[in-house]
Amino acid sequence: MSQGIPEEIVDEIRQRTDLVSLINEYIKLERRGKNMVGLCPFHNEKTPSFSVSPDKQLYHCFGCGASGNVFSLIMQMENLTFPEAAHYLARKAGVTVPEKKAQTGVESLKDKIYRLNELAARFYAYHLHNSEGGKKAYNYLLKRGIKQEAIELFKLGYAPPGWTGFYNFALKKGAPPDLMVKSGLVSPGREKGYYDRFRDRVMFPIFNISGKIAGFGGRTMSEGDKSGPKYLNSPETPVFDKGNMLYGLNLAREEIRRQKKAIVTEGYTDVITAYQAGIKNCVASLGTALTAEQGRLLRNQADTVVTAYDSDTAGQAATWRGLAILQSTGCLVEVAEMPEGSDPDTFIRKNGPEKFHDLVSEALPLIKYRLQQLKKRHDLTSDKGRIDFIEELMPFLLTAVNQIEQDYYLKKAAEILDIEEDALRRELKKRRSYDKRKWKKEDLSKEIEPQKISLRPEEKNILSLMLQSKEIAEEGRNLLKLDYLDNSEAKKVIEEIWNLSAGELVFSIEKLLNKFEDQQIVSIISEAATNPEMQDITDQTAKRMLSDSINKLHMLWINRKLKELEEKRKSYEARGMYNEANELLMKENELIKHKGSNPDLLGKGGDFNG
């Protein structure tokens, strides 16, 4: 599975990379016995099912099945191939990957775009400090209260007004035009040639959670500029999708985790001004319509999310849809109401960080805030106003953090509308059923995912126990006959466990994982290795559990054999083949005698193949 990278280098990368520290860059983990647990970064959940074994350096989600080691994690989180993930981890761990002729071109398109974005950021920063237009941009930033330290920290810059400034610069540095187009920094002309996407704009690099520049946002400096949109973002590229990113998260992550709270604003300058003022748990949503992916990013870092949007956009329909999506991912969402005509940037500069802290601390739970807004907006003395009120409230009641919150606000809504609580509850139940039917209907249109491999509980136990130690694996070899297993994948894994335990002084789960490329088998191994029920048991208990599980499978195997022999015997009797039928009857009686016996007394099951 090293795919061109020497096995010893792969091992060195693995040994130098701590899985828990790596995962902590993306989500919060908490100790639970020998393992660590957290909310899965790969699917929405409100109860942690993502388990990490520090000892075995493996993770497994008991909700969606995502599993693996440090390489699998980076491949899944960053959407990388194995060689890309290995190079990514090698750079973090300080491991040199030897370049071979076969590896020429190993740098992926994503890596090239990241490198070009870094070059662009340096180009824009140079022009901010060394050009006539840059002076204007620099003064604009100072006027907005942004200091030199923040300019450097956030790598702000200025895109010159010419049509081909960056294009010509990047061309001289060896960047091919097609790469510039794929990065979104340059656009092809209608006839011939290329032109810069960003011109005469203050530039805000947009970093991913790992701190790489994934894209840019450019802002005009004149409020009356009609030459283009006020804000212009990079287009979607292999490394940039604004629905999957939050501006400033790379810098805010640690403070968000410390406070267990994130403040979501609308703009770049909101984040920068807040950071300068010591409010370091702020991010911007790159638009008010939050996505489920952004919700997962926030949920993985914070328990509570407070939105502080501009007063003129906070009431827009897209904003409310985004907040409902955010709450549905499992976040506790609160809304800080900005004074009329202000945003966090202007509010902090005018009133100071303490007043902003007060405003955030007074934020209302999302549904309570929504109730207040709907009460102001609708004429509840008219049928239409009451119907509109219910229509707009229902999506938020359905995303309540828990049943208690839902019941509380459902009762409040019934009081506001002066209707029976049960009537509103019936309507909510109807909406919930509709949503489920809609989900099932939409799900049928999606590509059908492969079925998860299904193991019997006893098979899972045997795998988990034999992965605990070389001694338990050898005990399994002495007691278990592979025919007892229903599942063919489980048989393959156990055969490899026996092969490795026989040839190694210390059993290595990593070497076992390397034997399989099928992700479903990797998932079986990871789930077995991280099984929380097997983490704190003694060797004596493990051996007893192993024997019990094997005995159960042995009995099930005998029952299967008895059924097969009985069916075959009846077929012989129906055809008048009584000698053959009697031979099978003798085998049935022999099996019945040993039913429930310890399998090792039968020579690992005996010879009852009929």
Image: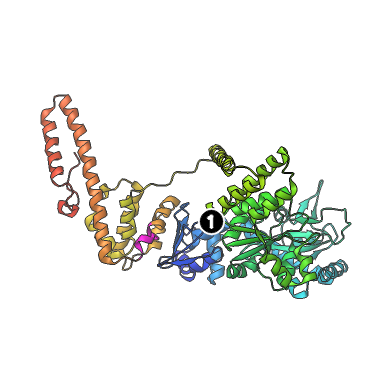
Badge 1 density bin: few <14, some 14–19, many ≥20, Cα 10 Å: some
Q: Which residue is mark 1?
A: 76
Image quadrant assignment for residue 59 = bottom left
The residue closer to the viewer here, 592 or 178, is 592
Image quadrant assignment for residue 303 = bottom right
- Residue 65 left/right relative to 557: right
Give the magenta range. Answer: 528-535
- Residue 176, given in percent of the width and then of the height, sits at 72, 57
**Residue at screen point 73% across, 70% down:** 355
Tell me the kind of residue under disc 1: Gln
**Residue at screen point 64% across, 59% down:** 334
Image quadrant assignment for residue 288 = bottom right
Quadrant, the N terminus: bottom left
Q: Is residue 212 visible?
A: no
- Residue 462, given in percent of the width and then of the height, sits at 30, 55
Q: What kind of secondary structure does the magenta stretch mostly adopt? A: helix
- Does the stretch in magenta take in 586? no
- Residue 340, given in percent of the width and then of the height, sits at 80, 59
- Residue 143 left/right relative to 102: right
- Does the stretch in magenta take in 533? yes
- Residue 389, given in percent of the width and then of the height, sits at 68, 44
- Residue 164 left/right relative to 378: right
